[in-house]
Amino acid sequence: MQISKIKEPKQLSKRIQWLRDYYFSGINRKWNNEFTAWTTGTPWDTQYDELTYYIVPETYPFLETFKSSMKQYARKVETPDNFFQWSLPERKAWFVKETMVNYVPQELLPGDLIAGARFNLMTSMCWTEEEAKAVNKRIYGKNGSRVKMKWFHDHGYGNAGATSGHIIPGYDKVLRIGWKGISAELKNHYDNLSGSEKESSKGAQLRAMMTAAAMPREMAEKYSNLCESKVKQESDTERKAELLQMAENLKKVPWEPAETFWEAMQALWLTHMLVMSDENYPGPGVSFGRIDQYLLPYWEKSLAEGMDKEFGKEIMKTFWIHANTAYDAMIRVGANQGISAGYGQLITLSGMGANGKDATNDLTYAMLEVIDEMSPILEPKPNVRLHRNSPDKLLNMLIDMISSSQGSPFLLNFDERSMAGMMREAKTGKFEALITKTNVYDYAPVGCLENTMTGNDRSGTVDNNLNLLKAVELTLTGGKDLNMFIDPITGKKEKIKQDGSKTGDATKFKTWEEFKEAYIRQTEYIVKKIVDLYETSESIRAEFNPTPYLSCMVKGCAEKGMDVTQGGAEISFTTIEAVTYATTVDSLLAIKHLVFDKKLTTMEELIKALKNNWKGFEVLQARAKYKTPKYGRDDDEADAMGRFVMDVWTGETWKYKTKSTHRQFRPGMLSWNYWVGDGYVLAASPDGREKGQFLSNAICPVNGTDINGPTSNTNSVGKVLGGRTEIGDWKDFVNLVPNGTSHTITFNPSFIKDAEHKEKFKAFLKGYVENGGTALQINILDPDMLRDAQKHPQNYRHLLVRVTGYNAYFTAIGRELQDEIIARISHEKL
Amino acid sequence: MAEKNTINAHLLEIQRMSTEDGPGIRTTIFLKGCTLHCSWCHNPESISPKPQLQWLQTNCMGCQLCVAACPNNTLSYVDNQIIIDRDICEACGICVEECPTGALEIMGQAISVDEVVQEVLKDKAYFEKSNGGITVSGGEPTMQADFVAEFLKRMKENGIHTALDTCGMIPPFAYEKILPYTDLLLYDLKEIDSVKHRKFTGNPNEKIFNNLLTISEWMKIHGKPGELWIRTPIIPDATDTEENIAGIGKFIAENNLQPNRWELCAFNNLCNDKYLRLGTRWIFEKYDLLEEEKLNHLTEVAKKSCGINDKRVLWTGSAKTKETKISKRGNEPQPVNYCRITGLPEEE
């Protein structure tokens, strides 16, 4: 069997090739950006912030290990005598600055054009003994956040925790006015405080932010000195000149406003990497926003002044390498040398500008070239925004990039539907003064695809992940777990007890309407439950984990004298991401169809089947799987159920705000990897899924149910988001899920096999703008998936392969032809 | 045949996001029933106009509920196989209803124009963006001319591009009903030698070639359909000869047909399982895909013979891959006994 063709980087200079190869040599590297840990030296000191990992269930068994190992290898930073008399934000700001500037070494890799290497930090929490005691009680106590979040996850509800990152800091402003300008603004805010305000937490916060705002300048000075010292050792005249220029750049930026493209990229990188240091977390969705828009003036100016375009791209490529070193944080832990999909420093390209005009520019194309030439590479993760007026030139380039790699090297975001969501949250969350018809086009995604505004918005986009399916389970049982929880590590059994609403004995329900009412009650319950859980970690973070440096770049924090972790941002939502959506919809459809409409089974029998994980009920399971209506087929009746589920859970979500930080909850649909892991936690579901099988991913239909092709799948997604109506949120587009919805479609390679088909594919994307959701990941059917289908045909019953428009069920065509098709797909010659 | 106003079709399948049956993104409506019986047919389930029951082994869980449910004892379960007694089966659908896994299906459901229109309009946005539309295919759609005419008319009322895919063996008076609402005509010319044509498809070819001439005249007078694509299936050991392609090309040139496209559709081998599902075997099951050189060569022959020397003449589909020699189908293909399919006596 031939090995499938993997995309190779191309047209890389010697410099970039070396840097790229060096990066991918992983643990064999002499230099890396592994976490370094730092302590105040007190016995109660802590570095590891477990709250930010509550949304990563795989780490639960290791929380204690991480915490103690960071503490063990933490090195001491000398603190001033009166350190613990300062306010916590001031301690934190000072400590991070001191560590970054005076303890963490400044280094430069050979040939690098951007300075700023080590940034993965585990800094001291800087707590006093008293603070540490208080925090420990709230985290590890009997009713502490850890116990609560673990119970929540163990019982299949999902997870929640106050998580770092997931924000677009005001980088454009830093470039425009420099840290000098930001410092001046902070000082102005501080000077305007009354005497008593200066004594209050407001004053402390602003003083902390002023300290933090000095960090980039001190950092840049150190790096400038480093470059100068390298000049002396350098014999190559060209490199000498580069190093001299870098030293000059660093003398100026990021303190002063940037003027050239090189300065802007340098300023941007230093400013960005320090956010990751400040948060003790390597790039969790700390995103750049519309980078091709705000960097354009520098790009154009430098080109006009004679910068070679290729050199401009070379600068960007070194920037790309820097972004990837985030993964070095735990380079020696786990598989793949720490490289995981867990981080996401997103860049946004193209998209709508003012008055519906397209904003694609020369820099957009140059950046796409950089992505194409560097791929495959993970960071920064590109998200390309499309809309009705996206130019053909852009679409052509995107489709060429998709067809030359087996999956798309970027995510697509769709403006009209996304902006409809932003307008909806403006109205429902009462931010109508901040998100308006005339600025909403400047939204951008963070992390993966979560839409936010820029420079003034933290919307906790991954903080709450709720399994909607739990409400179906609770409805079937009248508010209890279906199966007894047995701790997988200790084997300890936990008695089943009443937890959800007492909606009564489901076997007594006479009509579908009764069941539906009970389901609504249980959804109310699970939403309330995740809101309460979130409050525990959110309130701890607000009180004890300030990030004053990041707060400097989030509008609202200086004005209110509040840290971004306290809800200081002008726009401060927190998001519930619904997981298991399609599994939930299909389960309700199955109950309605099997028990009430067709009476093919009774509620008793169904519940018994689910308790037994369908063992002994295979015929009923098959009916549930194959003979009931499903979401994702553009079947109006089934999609109406989808809309019902959407209305119920989003409606509940809008009812809540955090108590400690007054952040409004908003709906989103991103499932990260929970749809895989939680499949082993949640009981069997009425749609025919067994415990241990995957749940549905984000807004996608359940795997294998999408039998009418990409257009029907897309139409279903658009419909359940609200479709298009006379009074839309943005023009006629409605979007019930402002955060955005993750949608993946896998295409046969034959869809993009030649110029004629590429045109058709382009038209499909234009159709997606009209009918689809907010974000689309395009996958191309790959040989691995087909090989898996050979091994597990039961999971791929509906997998169609196409050869020249001729469709056949892959699982039905016999081994020889299957092998032939795999070989063909490997060669992209369908 | 159904009454007027409530015209029903025998529908085989509606395939959305089809990219091979005309320009742009299309929805293709496959109707059941064909006037030819091509020995290589890739959609054997489309030949009979009658509804047919089919069993998909890969979907079957062996519960045998169908066997018990059948009122006529048509089904039996032997060696993990559902055996359908096709002489008795009326395709009533009771077993399909009972089957929990969808392993049993009726092909050829009755469907109304309204229902098809409703389904097709769901993809209007994609048609508009791609200059695509709908294609009526089969089977031979002109066998259900009243339905097709009404459906295409409704499509034109909705501003949707229409294509008709025909084998050319058209019943009398059918085309006049349909062509006024057709934008693109996809017309098969398979074999120039009438004797061979009869051997391959069960019918001589005179009527097909003559129909095209009549339609071509009609098109000139009415200005509709605006486009003509001629399609020739390239089938190994059958239509894949230079003489055949050159002959069809000569016919095109001599009659000044001026097609907007002439496609040589390369043989593909994915339909084995369809024959098995119908309880029979495909006589081409041991054939591999054609060599790319051969397809290129035939395309050159086609260009030369029809006098259109540009990309309007092309081959489509897949050729054998060079790098992989996957196909190990055992023996060399045996000479095809066409009579088994076409139902003609062995020696003419």
Image: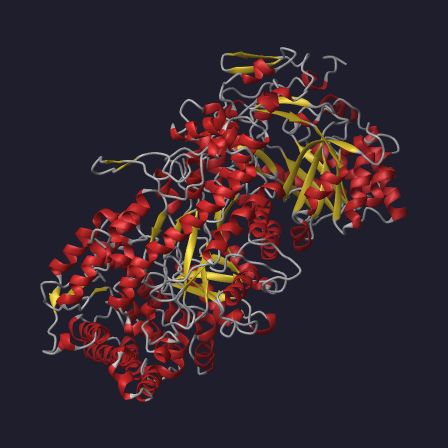
The answer to whether residue B22 is left or right of residue A588 is right
The answer to whether residue A411 is left or right of residue B92 is left
Specify how the rendered protein is coloured.
secondary structure
Residue nearer the viewer, A827 or A48? A48
- Relative height, residue A559 to residue A758 (above, below): below
Instruction: Please name the residue shown 68% across and 20% down the image.
Output: B92
The answer to whether residue B142 is left or right of residue A4 is right
Residue nearer the viewer, B101 or B283? B101
Report x, y in % for residue A23: 28, 59
- Relative height, residue B73 to residue A4 (above, below): above
Report x, y in % for residue A282: 29, 62
Report x, y in % for residue A331: 23, 55
The answer to whether residue A540 is left or right of residue B217 is left
Instruction: Please name the residue shown 28% across and 73% down the image.
Output: A548
Quarter of the figure with the N terminus of chain B: top right
Number of numbered callouts drawn: 0
Instruction: Please name the residue shown 18% across and 72% down the image.
Output: A99
Report x, y in % for residue A733: 60, 60
Q: Residue furthest right?
A: B221
Residue nearer the viewer, B21 or B109? B109
- Whether residue A817 is visible: no
Residue nearer the viewer, A620 or A692? A620
- Whether residue A360 is visible: yes
Quadrant in the picture for residue A187: bottom left
Quarter of the figure with the C terminus of chain B: top right
